[in-house]
Every structure is written in structure tokens, then in C-alpha cells.
Image (cartoon, rainbow, N blue to C red):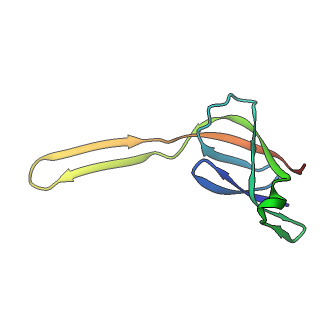
Amino acid sequence: MYAIVRAGGRQEKVSVDDVLNIDKVSEETGATITWQPILVVEDGNVISDADKLSGYSVTAEILGETKGPKINIMKYKNKTGYKKRQGHRQKHTQVRVTGIAAK
């Protein structure tokens, strides 16, 4: 069984015991978050009807904060001596999916 959930600005395919990096969440480590699935696949049956999906929920436990890969930004203009270097690392929250359940 797996589900598609909206976590932050993206959609993620999740199943039980998956570990994901999602956009930063304000809850603390050890807290539980609940998502409403967009689509559920159970034993080959695809459930995407909003009325039927209202009975499903996906729960996840927050493991901690992580950082994404380093992104190097380089700006340069030819023949003027202008160079600018900047770096960025996006902050993420690491979560483990604990269950996909029907209410």
C-alpha cells in the first residue's frame, strides 16, 4: 500500500517506514504530523475519489532537521571586473512515515 501526499510545495509517494526530506516544518523532533492523501493504492485498487479519501490519513514522525545540497551561485559580468559568489543550503525536515490508515 502506498499513498501520494502533498508535503510542502511538492507531492511525495509514501509508504510505511519511508524516510523523507520535506520542506521545513515548525513542529519539534518526535512530534507527529498528519497528512490527507491525494491518492491511495491498496492491493492494486486505486482510490482517488475525494469522498472515499476523506476516510484515509497518513501519519509521520519528525526525526529532525537536515540541510539540502549546497547550491553555488556565481554572477559575472565580462570586461567590468564584477564578480559575486553566493551559496545556499535549503533547510529541510526529515520524517518517517508511521502509518497509512483508514478511519
Residue 19, percent from left and from top: 73, 47
Residue at 60% x, 47% y is 8
28 relative position to 86: left or right: right
The image position of residue 96, as x and y in percent, is 76, 43
Kindly give the residue lying farthest to the front in the view shown. 51
Residue 50, located in which quarter of the rendered image? bottom right
Looking at this view, name the residue that lies furthest to the top.
28
At x 38%, y 48%, the residue is: 72
Q: Residue at x 78, y 65 (%)?
A: 49
Q: On screen, 67 above or below 1? A: above
Q: Is residue 36 above or below residue 49?
A: above
Q: Position of residue 38 (x, y in %)?
A: 72, 59
Q: On screen, 73 above or below 39?
A: above
In-front residue for pair 69/5:
5
Position of 30 with respect to 91 (left or right) is: right
In the image as oriented, which residue stretches furthest toward the bottom? 44
Reply above or below: 51 against 21. Answer: below
User: Closer to the camera, 37 or 95?
Assistant: 37
Quarter holding the N terminus?
Answer: bottom right
Image-based side of 44 in relation to 22, left or right:
right
